Amino acid sequence: MRGRRWRVVVLVLAAVYFLVPLLSAAEFSLRTPGGGYGVGNYLAIVTDEVLFTSLLTSLQIAVFTAVLVLVLVVPTAVWVRLRFPSVAGLLESATILPIVVPPVVMAAGIAFVQANLGGPVFRALFASSATALTPFYVVLALPFAYRAVDNGLAAIPLRTLVEAARNLGSSLASALLRVVLPAIRSAVLGAAFLTLALVLGEIVIARILLYTDTFPIAVVEVGRSAAGVSVALSLASLVFTWVLLLLVSFAGGRRSRKASS
Amino acid sequence: MSELLEAPAAPPDRVRPTRSWGAALGLLPFVGYLVVFLGGPLFFVISGALSTPEGQPTLDNLVASVTSPQYQAAFVSSLVLSAVTALVGAVFGAFLAQAVLTGRRDGPLQRIVSTASGVLAYFGGVPLAFAFIAALGQTGLATAFLRGVGVDLYGLGFRIDSLTGLGLTYVYFQVPLMVILITPALEGLLPQWREAAENLGASAWAYWRHVALPVLAPAFGGATLVLFGNAFAAYATALALTSGSIPLLPTAIASALSGNVLANQQNVGLALGFDMVVVIAVVMVGYLVLQRRAARWSAR
Amino acid sequence: MTSTADAPVATERGVAVEFRELRRSYGNTHALDGLSLALRPGELLALLGPSGCGKTTALRLLAGFDTPTSGEVLIGGRDVTGVPAAKRDTGMVFQAYSLFPTMTAAENVAFGLRMRKVGPAERKRRADELLQVVGLGERGGSYPHEMSGGQQQRVALARALAVSPSVLLLDEPLSALDARVRVQLRDEIRRVQLAEGITTLFVTHDQSEALAVADRVAVLNAGKLEQVGTPQEVYAHPATPFVAEFVGTTNHVPVADGRITPGGETRQVRPEGLAVGVPDGLAATVLTSTFLGPVTRLVLTTEVGELVVDATSRPGLPAIGDPTRSPWPRSDSRTQIQRLAGNGLRPPRESLE
């Protein structure tokens, strides 16, 4: 009871700090040229063909990235927990790297490759924004995806599940696919939606490599002439991914509660 | 960088070497991916920094990157901005995480904060800058509200495109990152430690001072270092908010890369990138040391 | 090891503790439902019961980590119900992992004294002294993660005793340890407790542990006190069917004329109260046989149901599946449980056949 007061202060402060900019942006995005309020800016996503195409491009990148991230992260996280727990700390540190390595530095290195190295492999890699950006967005998405999946694994009796499945005659791969993956589905979805959040916001690498057909870049570009549309769409994509994550969180919670009772 | 990523030799006990090599092999896809797609670009940054545009080895770029007053200023303001926002973000983020954890387990508050942290940690660039301009710009809503209650921010010298304004904006993605990083450590504080301390006559403050904070210190330090690196790496937000009026390392790199003023600029840009990598390497070594220490104290 | 005195000698250190009509409810569930219990000065009382019976709640109410819905807690005759945990003057040993990980063993032990503003020299002296007492005089500089579970619990015991508390609280302190270490530390705790003469509440779900160390055992079920008495009383004269079932193993045997007779009067008999190989007994078949060292536990099927018999381990005991002559109650009444007056004891379990 004694500790209640500081808690309220911190939560109120956080609510003010985090909500005021969002609400201010929301207010701005709802303004209409005439001086009133309306949702016109939000409708640009369906009326403006460039924006709409860019959204499709980015969603495509997001899907590719999420799949690749999960293919890398899930088996590795399972493997570390089952067979190689001694490197767990080191691997977690490795996943910190993409947070601290500046995207602009990464982009500089990639740009160097793009400009100076030829050959069919590189030509294929840099042929479109999807092929060029996906591999590097995977790197950027790893830190949080790894954490999300690893937290999911920590919550299930992983070793028992896998050993039981293998004891019943399934291969390691099918034990992963049929037993482990369903058990951590909310963590996996969480990781996928975090990846979506990343892809819908990343502009540094895309801009330096001159792939300007992605959604976040198109949103910034449209902002030069119509700031309201730009703000509206950024806000919408932020809220959209957050709501997805929240739904996953609540759905996952209900499931586990049912399972435990 | 790649040394950090290499799997270590087999753990000394319990596991037979052959099995461990097999186990290490299982990490190959993940580690290999990082080496190629993160290590690769870094390699070209470093090699580019150490050579002339014609490909001859040289240290001139590096010398230029640390002696030019323009870049020195960028270095200083980047370091200050990163350090201050890392500290502020770490302290406030830790308080927020603890405030959320002391609530109902898996309650709505915990779910909202943990999911929002994931999204907001990636929130940056133009949208974030714009949200702050909409709130705290000259004609922002919060500015107007504060003026209404008698606080004239701009009269007091505040500018959203100043270093202070930029710092205030950076905290917006620093705090969520801290919440994500520190929550596991806070959850690792066992309830019986608090009860044992209380039972032995410790006040709540004495418990935090003598028991909880020493346990948390390595994790807190490590998370703060990551926050530092995170701010140090941020680029799009600064550019959008200040249009480059405040010199920062990432903006200096970007303009050097796209610059066509001087022939050597590209490689100087890479040299600046190299400087950043050095700072990041120092940060990572510190992080690893602290992480090892934190692992030693975790009870189970 | 176990003191058999009905009233342990009160020492100077010992302080009486009393629970009065203690109730603790969480919503509609009653963790404690009117518990009244008194600890005599200097005695070790084991609070025994299955998980969820309220024993830990009682201990936490005594420590001050929880507040009762109604009722009082008295330490040394003083009502401490509203006194915060930090001021209750109790010393507590937790289940496991309660040592402060960033402090050495000696620093852990000295922590309570530090909180009481005792000077460094005196703190060190007292910490060394107590580590000696628990047999860890050499390990003062070790960190918890460098010690075994048993050693950690010894340090925890020393830490709890360092502040010379008026009451020692033990919350299942042995449950996380290996069987061997458990017995060792159990005897160690009893030795130290007797030496210090400190009133002690020992919470456990393990009846053998409770019977082995306690002056008196209080059996708790569903938030209510079932029986309190010496280990011998509780074992030989269970006050309720629950106690009979929970403490030790019990056979429900129909007896007439001192022999097992179908349709006879139901008696409760401990496994060691029955014998096998008695020439003119009932026919029985060995269902399982478990070697326990000095005794072998046999489960027999007979026409009066399954019976559990502890026979002295010796060559020639019947093996699984062997027919044998029926068990026979020993005349020695010590091993027979006194029949409960006028209540409906549960009938013998159905035979498997």
Image: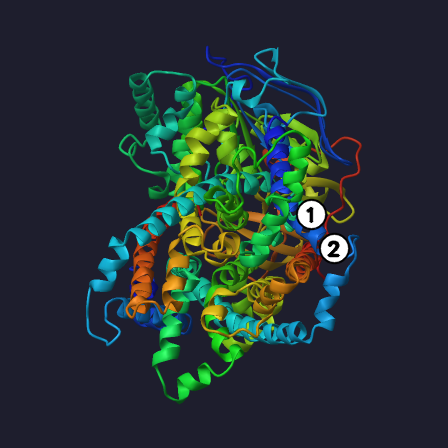
Give the answer, above or below, for where A218 lies relative to A95: below
Classify residue C99 by image quadrant. top left
Residue C269 in the image, given as x and y percentages of width and height: 65, 41
Classify residue A161 by image quadrant. bottom right
Tell me the subunit letter for badge 1. Answer: B
Q: Seen in the image, is C73 located left or right of residue C148? A: right
Residue C118 in the image, given as x and y percentages of width and height: 37, 16
- Closest to the observer, C336 or C278: C336
x 25%, y 59%: residue: B64
Mark number, residue A106: none
x 44%, y 29%: residue: B209
Q: Is residue C231 visible?
A: yes
Residue that mark 2 sits on: A30
Circle 2: residue type: Leu
x 27%, y 54%: residue: B68
What is the secondary structure assignment of the residue under circle 2? Answer: helix
